[in-house]
């Protein structure tokens, strides 16, 4: 039973991200490189967040309960802010790299910023999901029984679905964030930051996993819809894709084979 929980939760959390990687990134070496760099940027943001948390917890050591609560809130705020700052730094790096490639070889077609936004967002999401869920996933192998002392019996399943939504949200946030930087729509960056902060704050109501997940998935659907339209999608293109009538998509798949 523990093995079934382990593999089931692992495929729920990382299955869609793995599919996106295999079908859209793995065949292009340059995309793989950008994905790894994006994951590295998230790791560096985690390092800075850990340093801030260490300094804050050292200053507030042995304080009463309310101080510890506010310290936790500060830690989440600082972590989200640092992650978005590194997302912006990665955008600037990709922008400089794209301009440099054009100046060196004008005939070479550089990857579009929309594609780079998707790849970098997936890199951020995969690394975030791995760090947030790997310890919980390892505990699912046992020993022990979840819920035997009155705790939520679906803890591992809820954690898997929450990890999935975080990974997909990072993809959508990356697309919206890069589009806002390209078009200088700074309110898009603010919305990304606020929704990221809101989803992170939902973890504070951990006993209410149902409310937590439903709220996170509503935010994911809204953000995904926004990312779809800012990346050039339309209701017509969505309909053609679902009905397998998009000629450009079908021709691309034939060429890929």
Image: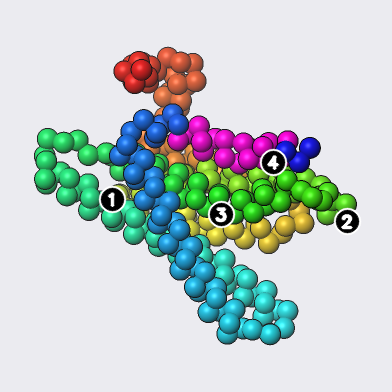
Please tell me whether residue 198 is drawn above or below residue 123 in the rendered image: below
Q: Is residue 107 left or right of residue 34?
A: left
- Which is closer to the viewer, label 2 or label 4? 4
Is 15 in the magenta? yes
| Cβ atoms under marks 4 and 3 closer than 8 Å | no
Q: Position of residue 161 (x, y in %)?
A: 65, 43
Please tell me whether residue 152 is drawn above or below residue 204 in the rendered image: above
Q: Is residue 16 left or right of residue 234?
A: right
Is 186 in the magenta? no
| Residue at mark 2 to residue at mark 1: CA–CA distance | 50 Å
Residue drawn 64% across and 75% down? Answer: 70
Crowd band around label 3 with a 10 angstrom C-alpha radius: few (<14), some (14–19), many (20+): few
| Residue at mark 1 to residue at mark 3: CA–CA distance | 25 Å
Residue drawn 57% across and 40% down? Answer: 14
Mark 2 or mark 3: whose residue is earlier in sequence? 3
Residue, disc 2: 149
- Which is closer to the viewer, label 2 or label 1? 2
Q: Which mark is residue 2?
A: none
Residue, disc 1: 94
Q: Is residue 208 left or right of residue 217?
A: right
- Which is closer to the viewer, label 1 or label 4? 4
Residue, disc 4: 6
Mark 1 or mark 3: whose residue is earlier in sequence? 1
Residue, disc 3: 131
| Residue at mark 2 to residue at mark 3: CA–CA distance | 27 Å
Question: Tag 3, which secondary structure?
Answer: helix
Mark 1 or mark 4: whose residue is earlier in sequence? 4
| Cβ atoms under marks 1 and 4 closer than 8 Å | no
């Amino acid at each position: 039973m523990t093995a079934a929980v382990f593999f089931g939760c692992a495929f729920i959390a990382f299955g869609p991200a793995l599919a996106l990687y295999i079908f859209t990134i793995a065949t292009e070496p340059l995309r793989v490189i950008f994905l790894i760099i994006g994951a590295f940027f998230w790791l560096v943001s985690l390092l800075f967040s850990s340093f801030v948390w260490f300094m804050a917890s050292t200053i507030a050591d042995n304080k009463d309960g309310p101080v510890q609560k506010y310290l936790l809130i500060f830690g989440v705020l600082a972590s989200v802010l640092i992650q978005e700052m590194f997302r912006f730094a990665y955008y600037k790096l990709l922008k400089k790299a794209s301009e440099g490639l054009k100046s060196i070889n004008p005939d070479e077609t550089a990857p579009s910023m929309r594609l780079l936004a998707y790849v970098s967002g997936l890199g951020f999401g995969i690394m975030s999901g791995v760090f947030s869920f790997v310890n919980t996933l390892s505990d699912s192998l046992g020993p022990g029984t979840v819920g035997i002392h009155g705790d939520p019996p679906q803890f591992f399943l809820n954690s898997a679905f929450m990890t999935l939504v975080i990974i997909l949200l990072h993809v959508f946030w990356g697309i919206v964030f890069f589009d806002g930087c390209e078009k200088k729509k700074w309110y898009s960056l603010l919305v990304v930051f606020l929704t990221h902060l809101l989803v992170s704050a939902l973890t504070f109501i951990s006993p209410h996993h149902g409310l937590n997940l439903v709220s996170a998935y509503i935010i994911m659907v809204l953000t995904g819809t926004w990312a779809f339209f800012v990346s050039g999608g339309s209701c017509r293109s969505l309909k053609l894709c679902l009905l397998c009538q998009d000629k450009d998509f079908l021709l691309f798949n034939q060429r890929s084979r």
